[in-house]
Amino acid sequence: MADPTVLIEIHDGVATVRINRPDKLNALNTSVRTGLREAFERIAADPTIGAVIMTGAGEKAFVAGADIEELSRLDEGSGRRFADEGQALYNRIESLDRPVIAAVNGYALGGGCELALACHIRIASSSAKFGQPEVNLGTIPGYGGTQRLTRLVGKGKALEMILTGEAVDAQEAHRIGLANAVVPPADLMATAERMARTIMTKGPRAVAHALRAVQDADERHLSGGLEAEAALFGQCCGTDDFREGTAAFLQKRKPQFRNA
Ligand code: COA
């Protein structure tokens, strides 16, 4: 049987959720999304878990985005549903009443950057890179990136990243507030665990209420923004440029966009 694409390990109340598709840079395919949903259902139902660390298998990638092979088959209707489902999954992670810390061990691109953004805190390895390269494929972030990145780093920097598709390294991510800290790769998991355990010494109800209160700070605007994002993502998936952008990636060539 194939290895599970999402692994969950629980040690003394800390759950580590590891996306496990290293040969495809942990790209989010259907199996990974299902595995993440199940992992967070299990965590939500287990009160002995006090904190979660989210990371990727291997040394190269946290998550290099949605699986472009699956993405390439979307049209306007299925693209809209794809965004709605991904947003629901990430909302579920963000609304957990215990802290979720992303240990970003490499590329966090597209849906991977958005996954890190849906976590409450981001610790980056010095080899990490964050980016929203969807424009290279003829589409836009669809899993909350236009909303959460803008809230975290401000409109100017968010637009720079989303419009150029260029990734920022860990130091720059730290400078702009996208990463809470940068540490050597060898210290990444220990640093994330230390922070998780610090939070777990606090009153659990206070931690849950703090998470809820901070989330409430922009909840109403967030849901309106997510709705707009999903509709626009779906529209992008109905275009010839999206077919061309995804096909060009899979064929390892430069895309020729025609504004169609
Ligand atoms: N979806 C599907 N497959 C992906 C992927 C994705 N998002 N990202 C990487 N892969 C696959 C590659 O196709 C390759 O598969 P292969 O070995 O079967 O050819 C494998 O993972 C390794 O990636 P590769 O591109 O060879 O590594 P690299 O070091 O040359 O480049 C990246 C690394 C991250 C720069 C490059 O993989 C990339 O640009 N990925 C896509 C990022 C992206 O656009 N994500 C947003 C999607 S919305």
Image: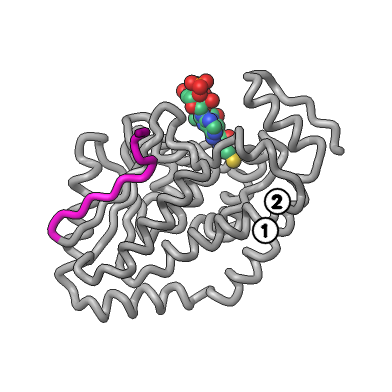
Residue 149 as seen in the image, left or right of residue 60: right
Would residue 197 be visible to someone looking at this image? Answer: yes
Structure colour scheme: one colour
Q: Amino acid at mark 1?
A: Glu
- Answer above or below: position of 205 versus 255: below
- Answer above or below: position of 77 versus 160: below
Q: Amino acid at mark 2?
A: Ser
Image quadrant for the C terminus?
top right
What residue did someone put label 2 on? 78
User: Could you tell me if the residues under marks 2 and 1 are in contact, i.e. CB atoms within 8 Å?
Assistant: no
Tag 2's secondary structure?
Answer: helix
Q: Position of residue 28 (x, y in %)?
A: 49, 42
What residue did someone put label 1 on? 229
User: Within 10 angstroms of label 2, few (less than 14), some, or many (20 or more) residues?
Assistant: some
Q: Residue at x 35, y 56 (%)?
A: 39
Question: Residues under labels 2 and 1: Cα distance?
Answer: 14 Å
Q: Which residues are magenta?
A: 1-12
